[in-house]
Image (cartoon, helix red, strand yellow):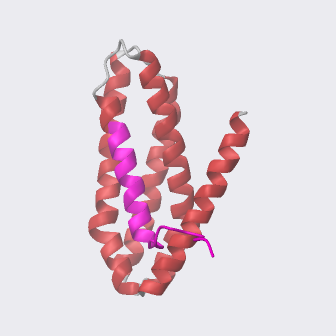
């Protein structure tokens, strides 16, 4: 019999942290560009936008509701609502960023602000929400959520690929 899956299943927290790291790297790369790198900036922004859209959707549809349902304390519920609001801020910033000319100094400033927003949000999740989730949910739940996240992400990426054709 052949192997159906050579990588071991990963839990939700590992998967979401990998997404954070990928977006941090892309934002860092964009921050280092200059006004002359128009096509590179445009390409990076499109990639970052897609990564953030998919990540936000799977977090809000799958991970956050599970966290909210497992939350026992007011502080945990506060983390849930704060995370949703931080997603909302990025959603408000992104359309304006996309309208900014890639050869402008303003683009570089917006790239820095977006990077700061995303790093703050990811950092809070990694330092506060994820450790709480590990206490509130057992390993089996986190692995199950991880599988749901993988499937949802694959589906959204497939839809995005079809939409670009």
Image side of residue 49 versus residue 4, left or right = left
- Residue 146 vertical placement versus 140 (above, below): above
- Residue 140 vertical placement versus 124 (above, below): below
Res 101 seen here:
no
Q: Looking at this rendering, what residue extends furthest in the front direction?
A: 1
Q: Residue at x 49, y 47 (%)?
A: 52
Q: Position of residue 123 (x, y in %)?
A: 29, 58
Depth check: give the residue in front, 6 or 74: 6
Q: Position of residue 36 (x, y in %)?
A: 36, 12
Quarter holding residue 138: bottom left
Q: Residue at x 48, y 24 (%)?
A: 42
**Magenta residues (range):** 1-27
Q: Position of residue 132 (x, y in %)?
A: 33, 78
Depth check: give the residue in front, 16 or 147: 147
Depth check: give the residue in front, 136 or 113: 136
Is the C terminus in the top left, top right, bottom left or bottom right quadrant?
top right
Res 76 seen here:
yes
Q: Is residue 120 magenta?
A: no
Q: Residue at x 34, y 56 (%)?
A: 122
Quarter holding residue 29: top left
Q: Residue at x 38, y 53 (%)?
A: 20
Image side of residue 53 versus residue 142, left or right = right
Is the N terminus in the top left, top right, bottom left or bottom right quadrant?
bottom right
Q: Is residue 2 magenta?
A: yes
Q: Position of residue 125 (x, y in %)?
A: 34, 64
Image side of residue 80 versus residue 160, left or right = left
> What is the number of callouts on the image?
0
- Residue 157 vertical placement versus 67 (above, below): above
């Amino acid at each position: 019999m052949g192997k159906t899956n050579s990588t071991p299943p990963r839990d939700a927290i590992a998967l979401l942290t990998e997404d954070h790291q990928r977006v941090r790297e892309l934002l860092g790369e964009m921050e280092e560009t200059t006004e002359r790198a128009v096509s590179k900036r445009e390409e990076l922004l499109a990639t970052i936008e897609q990564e953030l859209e998919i990540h936000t959707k799977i977090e809000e549809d799958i991970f956050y509701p599970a966290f909210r349902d497992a939350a026992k304390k007011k502080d945990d519920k506060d983390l849930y609502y704060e995370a949703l609001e931080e997603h909302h801020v990025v959603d408000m910033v992104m359309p304006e960023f996309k309208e900014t000319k890639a050869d402008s100094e303003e683009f570089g400033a917006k790239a820095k602000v977006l990077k700061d927003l995303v790093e703050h949000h990811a950092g809070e999740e990694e330092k506060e929400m994820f450790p709480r989730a590990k206490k509130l949910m057992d390993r089996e739940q986190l692995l199950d959520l991880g599988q749901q996240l993988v499937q949802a992400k694959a589906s959204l990426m497939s839809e995005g690929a079809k939409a670009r054709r």
